[in-house]
Image (cartoon, rainbow, N blue to C red):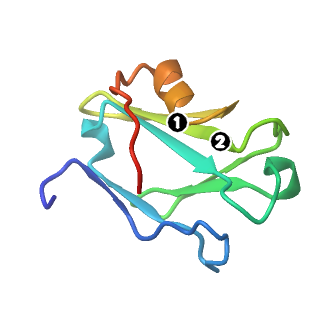
Amino acid sequence: RNAAPFIQLDKDDRSGAAQDGENMALFRPDLLHKVVIFAMIYEGTANFSDVNGRLLLTDEQGREITIPLNSPDPRYRFCAVALIEGDGERIAITKEECYLPGHRECDQKYQFGFRWRAGSK
């Protein structure tokens, strides 16, 4: 947990009420092979067409990249927003904006290879 690389999320805002959104930090992203940043609508709106969805990335120098969700698919409440890939030296960020039925389909598309089974919270 304290050794790079790792990912830290400050909160899981399922309501959309957080004024500052959700903030994720990637420590040594160059050492992370593949990260998919996704957004999922839980409640409050029917789909991404009703929100001004966007991902704001800030690097260590404070430079910002905004990735807008400007082609929503009203059938889906799950969106793979961006793909971050590292090779040990550099990182590449790709806008995906890929709307999917859910987590399992995202796993299949990006070939993480998770073993899925029924569970509960």
Q: Which residue is mark 2?
A: 78
- Where, quadrant-wise, is the N terminus in this rendering? bottom left
Q: Name the one closer to the observer, 87 or 101.
A: 101
What kind of residue is marked 1?
His
Look at the picture and state if 67 lies above or below 87: below
Q: How many marks?
A: 2
Q: Is residue 36 above or below residue 24?
A: above
Is residue 17 toward the left or the right of residue 83 in the image?
A: right
- Name the residue rendered at 56%, 44% in the picture: 38
Q: Nearer the viewer, residue 1 or 114?
A: 114
Question: Which secondary structure lies at badge 2?
Answer: strand
Q: Badge 2: few (under 14), some or many (20 or more) residues near its Cα, within 10 Å?
A: many
Q: Nearer the viewer, residue 68 or 53?
A: 53
Q: Quadrant of residue 57?
A: bottom right
Q: Indicate the position of residue 3 as horizontal and vertical percent values.
A: 12, 55
Q: Earlier in the sequence, mark 2 or mark 1?
A: 2
Left or right, 106 with reference to 46: left
The residue that appears at 30% across and 39% down in the rendered structure is 30
Q: In the figure, is residue 88 to the left or right of 96?
A: left
Q: Which residue is mark 1?
A: 103
Residue 89 percent coordinates (x, y): 27, 33
What's the residue type where badge 2 is placed? Phe
